[in-house]
Amino acid sequence: MSARKGFAGTSDSLPALRFEVIEAAQILRMSRAQLYNRIHDGSIHPQKDGARTYISWAELERYVAACSAVQSVATRSELTGRKLELGPTHTRESE
């Protein structure tokens, strides 16, 4: 009996450490195109394995944490009336 026999979702299955692009997009609740845009702009760092592209669980967690940090900074800047720097070409002004 192999260690991967129960991989299809039973309690003794191995944890998923990386996901295909479509799976990662579903986890992040975004489209595949949006995920590729995040990869292209450097917000998400993929892993390549030959021609296949994967996103690791750790990278998904890092991205979500970074989004939360940007959101909290944006909220603070809106409260203080300061300009928020979002990146090299994007700025956001509070109303």
Image (tube, grey):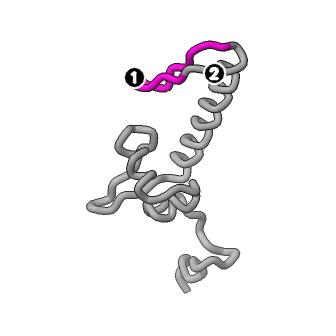
Q: Could you tell me residue 84's position as x and y percent?
A: 56, 19
Q: Which residue is painted at 53% across and 58% down in the image?
A: 17
Q: What residue range appears in magenta? A: 81-92
Left or right of 56: which side holds 10?
Answer: right
Q: Residue at x 54, y 48 (%)?
A: 60
Could you tell me the amino acid type at mark 1? Pro
Q: Nearer the viewer, residue 1 or 15?
A: 15
User: Closer to the camera, 24 or 47?
Assistant: 24
Residue annotated with mark 1? 88
Q: Secondary structure at mark 2?
A: loop
Residue 6: image x %, image y %? 60, 81
- Identity of the residue drawn at 53% across and 24% down: 92
| Residue where numbered disc 2 is placed | 95
The crowd level at tag 1 (other Cα within 10 Å; few <14, some 14-19, many 20+) is few
Q: Hey, which quadrant is residue 87 in on the image?
A: top left
Q: Secondary structure at mark 1?
A: loop
Residue 76 lies, with reference to residue 1, above or below; the image says above
In the rendered image, the residue lying farthest to the left is: 51
